Amino acid sequence: MMAILTASRTIFSGSWQIISNEGDFLKIIVDSKENISKTVADMMAERLTLKPESVLSFTADESLVPIFSELCGRNCCENAVFFNLCDYVVPKADSEETSLYLLRSSLFSKLGITHVHSPDPAKPDEYDELIAEHGGIDIVLLGMGLNGCIGFNEPFTPYDSRTHIAMLTEVTRRAGAERFGSFENVPNFGVTMGLKTICESKTAILAAFGSEKADIVHKLVYGKTMTDVPAAMLQMHRDMILCLDEEAAAKI
C-alpha cells in the first residue's frame, strides 16, 4: 500500500508531485480541461513515437473525447493495438450505445485503426490471455466514476480481479443514462478488465474533470488503498499520472 506522507504544492511545469514513503511518486498535472487534453495527447504521442506498435487501452468516457480529438490531430496511433477496457453487456455488441462504438466513431475510424480487441461477455477469461499474448498493456487511459469506479470495477471489486462480468451500481447506470436515452434503458451488467489487469499496465493515465469529481479525487490521492474506492488501487501503480482540471483538484 502506498502511504502518502507529503504533498508538495510547489507547482512546476503545471504538475504537483505526491511523495510516498517508498520513494515512488504519483504525478499530478493540474490545468484547464483543454490544456489537459493537449498534455495527455502530447505524452502519448511521445511514447508512441518510441514504440509505434504500443498496446493501448482506453475507457470510452465522453469526458475523454477531447483527448481522443487531440490524438487524432497528432496521427500517432495508426500502428497501435487497442484493447477496449470495458463495455456494456447488450444484445448487439456494436450498437450505438456501446463503448466500442464511441471509440470507433471518435478515434478508430478517423485514424484508420484496425487492430482492435473487445472483451467477449461470454468468454471474459480469454481477454487477459489475449492481452498477455500482446505483451501486456503499455498505456491505459482512464476516466473515473463518482463512486471511484475505473472501467466497470465497482466498489468492493477485489484487487486481484481479472476481466469479468460486473453488476453495475445505480451511480454507474445513471452516468450512462444519456447515452441510452434513459436510466431504465441502461444495462445492469458490463464486462471489464479487472483491477489487477489495469494495474499491470506499464503506464496509467487517469483524467478527471469538474467539481463533482473533487471528493472522489481526494479519496484517490489520500485514501487508503481499499476496495471501496477502486481508483485508489492506482496508488500502487508503478507509473501513474493523474490529470485534473482545477475544479476536480480543488480538495487536494
Image: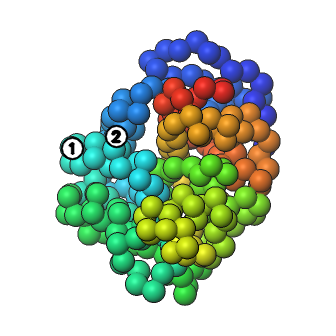
Q: Is residue 66 left or right of residue 228?
A: left
Can residue 125 be seen in this snapshot? yes
- Mark number displayed over residue 17: none
Which one is in front, 92 or 40? 92
Image position, residue 228 (x, y; %): 77, 53
Quadrant of the image containing the C terminus: top right
Which amino acid does the dot numbered 2 rest on? Ala
Label 1: few (<14), some or many (≥20) within 10 Å? few
Image position, residue 20 (x, y; %): 72, 29
Q: Is residue 3 left or right of residue 248?
A: right
Residue marked by disc 2: 41
The residue sitting at 77% across, 55% down in the picture is 227
Disc 1, disc 2: CB below 8 Å?
A: yes
Which amino acid does the dot numbered 1 rest on? Gly
Image position, residue 69 (x, y; %): 28, 47
Residue marked by disc 1: 73
The residue sitting at 67% across, 65% down in the picture is 169
- Image quadrant of residue 168? bottom right
Q: Is residue 203 left or right of residue 83?
A: right
The residue sitting at 51% across, 26% down in the picture is 246
Q: Indicate the secondary structure of the residue bearing disc 1.
A: helix
Q: CA distance from mark 1 to mark 2?
A: 9 Å
- Image quadrant of residue 125? bottom right
Q: Indicate the secondary structure of the residue bearing disc 2.
A: helix
Quadrant of the image containing the N terminus: top right
Does residue 69 lie above or below 29 as drawn?
below
Q: Is residue 237 left or right of residue 160?
A: left
The residue sitting at 59% across, 39% down in the picture is 212
Does residue 151 lie above or below 162 as drawn?
above
Residue at the top extreme, as displayed: 10
Can residue 47 be seen in this snapshot? no
- Image quadrant of residue 121? bottom right
